[in-house]
Image: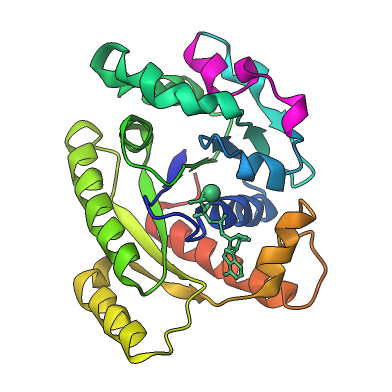
Amino acid sequence: MQIYALALEKGGVGKTCLAVNLAAAFSRLNLRVLVIDLDAQAHASHWLGISPTDVRPEDSVLGVLNGRALRDCVRPTDEGVDVLPAHTALASLPVQLATAPNSGLFILQDVLGQLNGPTPDYDIIICDLAPARGPVLATALAAATRCIVPVQPEELVMRALQALAGSVSQAQRVNTHLRGMSIVRNRYAPRSAGDHVYDQLLRDSYRAQLLRTILPVRAALRDSAGLQQSIFRYNGPDANEARNLFLDLVEELINLDGAT
Ligand SMILES: Nc1ncnc2c1ncn2[C@@H]1O[C@H](COP(=O)(O)OP(=O)(O)OP(=O)(O)O)[C@@H](O)[C@H]1O
Ligand SMILES: [Mg+2]
């Protein structure tokens, strides 16, 4: 079972876009996928077709952390993936974790470990994180097998990436299954001289972590969100190209980690 954490403190880089579309791409390969929405914004839940009014706080990870069985909280979606939806009450999650034993560091690892018996329920688990550092990120990294990071070539993103690299190294001390981070160049179109400086910096400093597949700006990846469809169900212009890029990304991840 692979557990991917989509993370970066910088907002709007494409974490949710990748979480939803990677999940749908893995599912197209007949893998069993669960998306865990750890962001109070609930964007991944919405994108996967869940209406916020249908979700109570106890249906989210908050319920699971307070003893509800994960299997009772996950829901099927039209994308063929299951989702543990988010609720705005997740805003209290950092405080809840901070006051739990060990700052709640192993809570998610324990919950997901129970799924990973001799016949795991899922092949792939994808955690969509809020743009923040702190206890939720630490808890997700303590459970993850890989951290996936969408980036653009700009100063604030590079700073956030450096901070995240530190968090990943720290998490690897308590989670020997965490292989490291993989960086996806998303909405990536270096044009200005400044962009090229950061593009070069990225290739020099993070060569080993950079995935080959680059996702350009494509209207389909933005417009599909409004229709609550992954790129694999959305039929507008550019959709086919974007689908193929997500299948390329998934192939890279399977080559790194295996499919289950
Ligand atoms: N390659 C792309 N081409 C066009 N639009 C994109 C692309 N990637 C993401 N977007 C759009 O950019 C916006 C921000 O993306 P997204 O919500 O995935 O970022 P995020 O990192 O999850 O944000 P947050 O930090 O707030 O959780 C969304 O409207 C999304 O649909
Ligand atoms: Mg998001």
Q: Nearer the viewer, residue 10 or 200?
A: 10
Residue ID at (44%, 24%): 93
Q: Is residue 121 left or right of 165 when viewed as pictured?
A: right
Q: Is residue 139 above or below residue 123?
A: above
Residue ID at (79%, 59%): 233
* Residue 38 x %, y %: 51, 34
Residue 118, visible in the rendered structure: no
Q: Main secondary structure of the magenta part?
A: helix
- Residue that protrudes farthest toward the right in the picture: 235
Q: Nearer the viewer, residue 55 or 82?
A: 55
Q: Is residue 68 above or below residue 5?
A: above
Is residue 56 magenta-colored?
yes
Judging from the image, the colouring scheme is: rainbow
* Res. 37 image quadrant: top right
* Residue 242 x %, y %: 65, 72
Q: Nearer the viewer, residue 83 or 160?
A: 160
Residue 57, visible in the rendered structure: yes
* Res. 238 image quadrant: bottom right
* Residue 149 x %, y %: 40, 57
Q: Is residue 150 above or below residue 70?
A: below
Q: Is residue 135 above or below residue 95?
A: below
Query: How many marks overall?
Result: 0
Please give the range of residues in magenta.
Answer: 52-66
Is residue 28 magenta-colored?
no
Residue ID at (18%, 40%): 170
Q: Is residue 107 left or right of 27 when viewed as pictured?
A: left
Residue ID at (81%, 72%): 236
* Residue 36 x %, y %: 55, 35
